[in-house]
Image: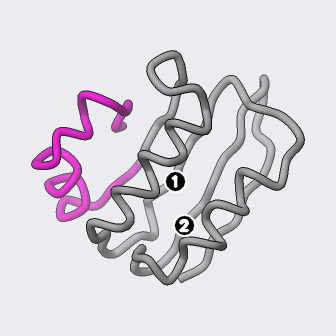
Amino acid sequence: MTVHSKLGEQDELIIQLQGNFDFNQYNEFTESYQKFDQIFKKYTVDLAEVKMVDSSALGMFLLLRDFAGGDSSEVCLVSPNPLVREILETSKFNKLFNII
């Protein structure tokens, strides 16, 4: 699993994940957004290269959402494969995140 973050356009942080996303990536994932000295208007988590997520990954998405501002934040989970999308929707994450 690899985690990379980069600045997008218009106050956006893009976090790119690759492989299986589980608790082993906790430190790397949280550092990917906490290392910046600001809160961004939008956070985009690119899931195109993620094969699977577990319950700890779901918790890490919730921690990102809280860090970004909770209900007033804009956190998008983009390009999940069908299995990851099913896990997100079964967990009702589509009510908390924009899943594209």
User: Image height check: is 41 above or below 43?
Assistant: above
Q: Secondary structure at mark 1?
A: strand
Which sits earlier in the primary sequence, circle 2 or circle 1?
2
Task: Give amino acid for label 2.
Answer: Leu
User: Image height check: is 23 above or below 89?
Assistant: below
Give the magenta-colored segment's residue range. 79-100
Q: Which mark is residue 17?
A: 2
Q: Position of residue 85 (x, y in %)?
A: 22, 53
Answer with the quarter of the image where residue 96 lies. top left
Circles 2 and 1: CB distance less than 8 Å?
yes
Q: Which mark is residue 21?
A: none
98 within the magenta span? yes
Q: Position of residue 61 (x, y in %)?
A: 44, 50
User: Image height check: is 71 above or below 87?
Assistant: above
User: Image height check: is 34 above or below 31?
Assistant: above
Q: Residue at x 60, y 78 (%)?
A: 2
Using the image as rendered, state which of residue 19 and residue 96 is in the foreground.
Answer: 96
